[in-house]
Image: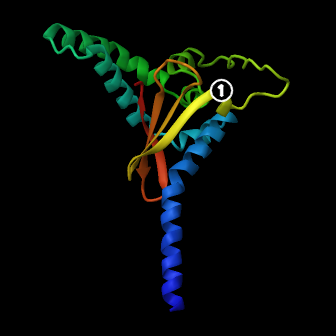
Amino acid sequence: MKHKVWLVGTGVLAMVGLYATPYLALHQMREAARTHDVQALAAYVDFPAVRESLKLGLRAKLVGGDVSPASVMGAEVAGALLGPMVDALITTESLGRVLQGQAPAQAVLLMGKAPPPVRVESPIETPMETRMQTQMGYESPSQFVFSIKPRGSDDDPVELVMRRDGLWRWKLAALRLS
């Protein structure tokens, strides 16, 4: 009987641990971004997958719903021009800025520069959670999405898509610009 209880307890603990792993990974990513630890943050990012997802997303936005040959050709030309730019601009630093709540375009424009000062209305710095509206959850057992946007903004959120990398690890694998 004790053996069965131990097995059931271990199974429940493992399930809870598996469920919690993307939340822990996201917390560690955000902490690495906050402390500007680029090596720690880079360990959680599949850069080729993130870059490819962004290229596909931009190409889809350029076409919109228009599938006319001219529109598709224009999107392909623009995509060919944007591709190398996306490759160069998606870095650990720019992703860290997105995790801290900056819009992707602003994060990319600020590469290599000091982050803009945060407006603080009291002597105590406002935590990101009060400035940003976030949402997170599973889309499937192997895909987890973290969306972020400025609180009160009408802008679409930026979605960071994490995918399971083995049983316990998660990596950022896509960036969606809704």
Q: Is residue 96 visible?
A: no
Taking depth in this image into account, of 116 and 123 the one nearest to the observer is: 123
Rendering coords of residue 11 (x, y %): 48, 73
Tell me the residue at 52%/28% (across/down): 91
> Taking 125 as reference, is 76 above or below it?
above
Taking depth in this image into account, of 42 and 163 the one nearest to the observer is: 163
Instruction: Judge from the rendering whether residue 48 lies leftward or rightward of residue 63; answer left or right.
Output: right
Rendering coords of residue 167 (x, y %): 44, 59
Residue carrying label 1 = 131
Tell me the residue at 74%/28% (across/down): 126
> Taking 7 as reference, is 175 above or below it?
above
Element at label 1: helix
> Taking 115 as reference, is 46 above or below it?
below
Q: Amino acid at mark 1?
A: Arg
Spot the residue most to the right. Answer: 123
Rendering coords of residue 85 (x, y %): 42, 17
Rendering coords of residue 99 (x, y %): 57, 32
Tell me the residue at 65%/16% (across/down): 113
Spot the residue most to the left. Answer: 69
Locate the C terminus and report the quarter of the image it occupies: top left
